[in-house]
Image: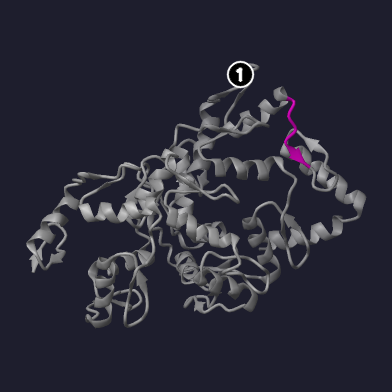
Amino acid sequence: MYTCSQCDKQFPRLSNLKLHHMTHAAEKPFVCSVCNKRFSRPYTLQNHKRVHSGTVEKLFSCEICGKRFRTKANINRHRNSHTREMLHSCTFCEKRFARKDNLTLHQRTHTGEKPYLCTVCCKWFKRKGNLDDHKMLHDRQNMYSCTQCGKCFSRPLSLKSHMRSHSDKFKCPECGKCCCGNQGLTVHRRIHSGEKPFECTVCSKRFTTSSSLVKHSRLHSGEKPYKCHVCNKTYSTSAILYSHSGVHMVDKPYKCSLCNKSFCRPSFLKDHQRYVHSNERPYHCPYCGKQFKINTELKYHVRIHTDAKPYLCGHCSDRFTTCKQLKAHLLKSHNEGTWFSCHICGKNFMWSRDLKRHLLQHEDVKPYVCSECPKRFYRADGLKSHQLTHLAVKPYCCSLCDKNFTHKSSVKQHFQYCLDELGLTNMIQLVTSAEETH
């Protein structure tokens, strides 16, 4: 066997090792004439060209299990899984693998490691192939678009998989939703059956998928495996890191037509327009009927009715409804964590952003200046709220009577007036009292 000196991967022939060395040298001399994607091996380029020609049938079938593959190399590698001894064991779940590289990829589902970074949008990926496919989305050339919903994909296979969501091949018999595959349908049907096979060993909460359990377990462990490569701040999920990475992006080409606020991603603009300017509240509480604009608010609200407290203190038996409540408890009761203290007046803050805002008041610095008048502000949101008075825009809408207001505080005050008129004050006070209790 010939062993690679850089990654310890082994090969039966010297020629295979030499081709493998090209992956470390980043040498990719073989270029696709259609999409300019580069490859280190000629036969890999030939296999890739079948993607553009449409000949992507899985011609090779395994005699043992019937699984099909597009290339002979893939089926040969698969056959070994039936005969080869599973030497590599996962230290997290004891699942075993015949190949070390498969074990490495599997363990990333536990650790959250995503070593491949897109330098355009700061999104991270577990596999280099996924990063390469993602980069083509930024190029917007040679894209494959869905004819029914307009969604774009970098590969025809991804489009083919997506098109199943528009067909009846994997259709849920209970609600009619179409899924992309049999696995997706199996997971979806657990919504109707109530099956939750994955249980948290700390609080006994159950989940429909193992990935949901992994994310939940980080609430108890405090693990934050996703690190921002710019400021080194860490997060518990890749989705939160992806949202945070927009802070560091200078280019914000997506502008709101109502308030001129700019965003670095179209999804952020869409969320802003729905949350700030729209009166739509699609999320309903199944217990009291209260409506919400975003699903996260509904999840926190439902805990009032269910008395769910998923955040457990590691020092005592106290439990909390939100992570913020747990952090405050750890600081005040167990002196765990770090207070952010003002060096001028000694006031303590739980969050660094609150301390920064506080210091501006001591220094009497108002860095945010209105372009229409001489008025200045400590915070950017104060300036943006003020600028609405010059634009004559009223982005805040009362959900009870559809009347529009310039400021959020105004619509809150008016909302209370509407409650009194409709005789709903007592019900809202009951809910508010429960929120404050928790």
For the question of whether residue 343 can be seen, the reply is yes
Residue at position x 53%, y 42% in the image:
354
Judge left or right: residue 27 versus residue 431. Answer: left
Judge left or right: residue 324 versus residue 113. Answer: right
Q: Is residue 395 magenta?
A: yes
Quarter holding the C terminus is bottom right
Picture coordinates of residue 403, whole percent (x, y): 83, 39
Q: Is residue 62 magenta?
A: no
Judge left or right: residue 306 versus residue 311. Answer: right
Q: Nearer the viewer, residue 369 or 86?
A: 86
Place residue 98 in its image quadrant.
bottom left
Picture coordinates of residue 74, whole percent (x, y): 28, 67
Considering the whole magenta stretch, tell me its main secondary structure.
loop
Q: Nearer the viewer, residue 305 or 11?
A: 11
Q: Nearer the viewer, residue 194 or 316?
A: 194
Residue at position x 32%, y 53% in the image:
48
Judge left or right: residue 360 versus residue 118. Answer: right
Picture coordinates of residue 432, whole percent (x, y): 75, 58
Magenta segment boundaries in residue numbering: 392-397
Place residue 12 in its image quadrant.
bottom left
Element under label 1? loop
Answer few, some or many: residues within 10 Å of disc 1's Cα (few below 14, many 20 plus, some between 14 and 19): few
| Pointer 1 residue | 371
In this rendering, is residue 328 above or below 277? Answer: below
Picture coordinates of residue 250, whole percent (x, y): 45, 32
Q: How is the image coloured?
A: one colour
Quarter holding the N terminus is bottom left
- Say which amino acid is labelled 1: Ser
For the question of whether residue 128 can be seen, the reply is no
Residue at position x 30%, y 74% in the image:
90
Residue at position x 74%, y 67% in the image:
286
Q: Nearer the viewer, residue 250 or 311?
A: 250
